[in-house]
Structure formats: C-alpha cells, structure tokens
Image (cartoon, rainbow, N blue to C red):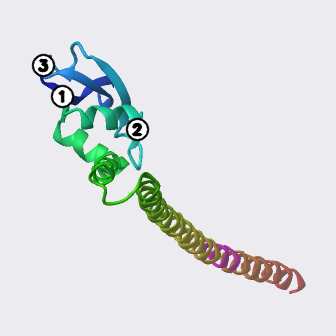
Amino acid sequence: MATKIRLQRGGRKGYAVYRIVIADARAPRDGRFTEKIGTYNPNTNPATVDLNFDRALYWVEVGAQPTDTVRNLLKNEGVYLMKHLRGGVRKGAFDEDAAQKKFDAWKEAKEKGFEAVRQSEAKAKKDLAEKKLAAEKKVNEAIAQKVAEKKAAEAVAKAEAAAAEEAPAEA
C-alpha cells in the first residue's frame, strides 16, 4: 500500500484550514485517512503549523510520500533535517547527541531569524504609526492656526463695528 502525507481541507468558504494526514495514495483528498499528524492554517501571518514531529518523522522514514506543499511544511519544521541526521547516525558519521545538538542549533538559528523578522515588522509598524501621528499633529496645528486667524479677524471686525457704532452716536 502506497501511503501519502497530504493536506485535508477543512474550515469555511474563503478561510481554509488543513489537517496534515497520512492516507492511502488512492484515497480522495478529503476522504479516508490513516492518521492525523498535524494542522496547517495558511490564513495567519506567518502561517501556523502544528505538527506531531515524532509521528511525521516516523512516516517519512518508513517511506510515506508527501505532496509538494506538505514537503515544504515538513522541511520548514525540520523533519527532513532530522531524517538526514539520523541517517548519519546509522552510518556512524556521528552519534545521537551530536545529531541532536546540530538540530537544536538549526532550530535556534531559525527562531532567531523569525524573531528578527517580527521585531523589524513591529518597528516598521511603530514608525508608521509615529509618522501618521506627526502628520496628524501638523494638520491639526494648521487647522488651529486657521481658526485662530479667523477668530482674530472676527475680533477685529467686531471692534471696528463697535467703533463705527460709537462714532456716529458721538456726532
């Protein structure tokens, strides 16, 4: 029996959420499956992947063929790197501890990269908000200045009108 690791669609129209499942290659996309190993939500930024790492690694090692999208998800989660490192352990290139250290270093570097991206996005968002606030203050100051000029003109006009009313009364 040929097994596939594939996505099974769920969610509502316009908001797809997927389950990552192990299924017979002949089964339809949303049909019968052997095991659910995770979920994938492409609607969030960044996309959310919740994966049972050990089961995914097991199925990849026993020969289940992933679809293109699932292969990319598994690579990003490090399943294929761990498979590669375990192969090195089996061949005697290094021991299990060294493999785990390499994997942890890769995972940490990846997390640092994600954190750097998050911080840069937050900084860009903050800078944009500050620019918008400064522009709004500038517009408000211009409006306040126009209002002050208008009030001053009205006060001068009232003073002239009051002076004009007093002047004919004296004559």
**In the figure, residue 92 lies in which quadrant?**
bottom left
- Label 2 sits on a secondary structure element that is helix
Q: Is residue 104 magenta?
A: no
**Where is residue 38 shown, x and y percent of the image?**
38, 30
Amino acid carrying label 2: it is Phe
- In the image, is residue 86 above or below residue 34? below
Task: Please identify the quadrant where the C terminus is shown.
Answer: bottom right
Q: Which residue is mark 3?
A: 1
Segment tinted magenta in the rendering = 143-148
Residue at mark 3 to residue at mark 1: CA–CA distance: 10 Å
Amino acid carrying label 1: it is Lys
| Predominant secondary structure, magenta span | helix
- Dots 3, 1 in contact, CB < 8 A: no
Q: Which residue is mark 2?
A: 53
Q: Please give the name of the residue rendered at 77% of the width and 76% of the height, measured from the top-left corner.
A: 158
Amino acid carrying label 3: it is Met
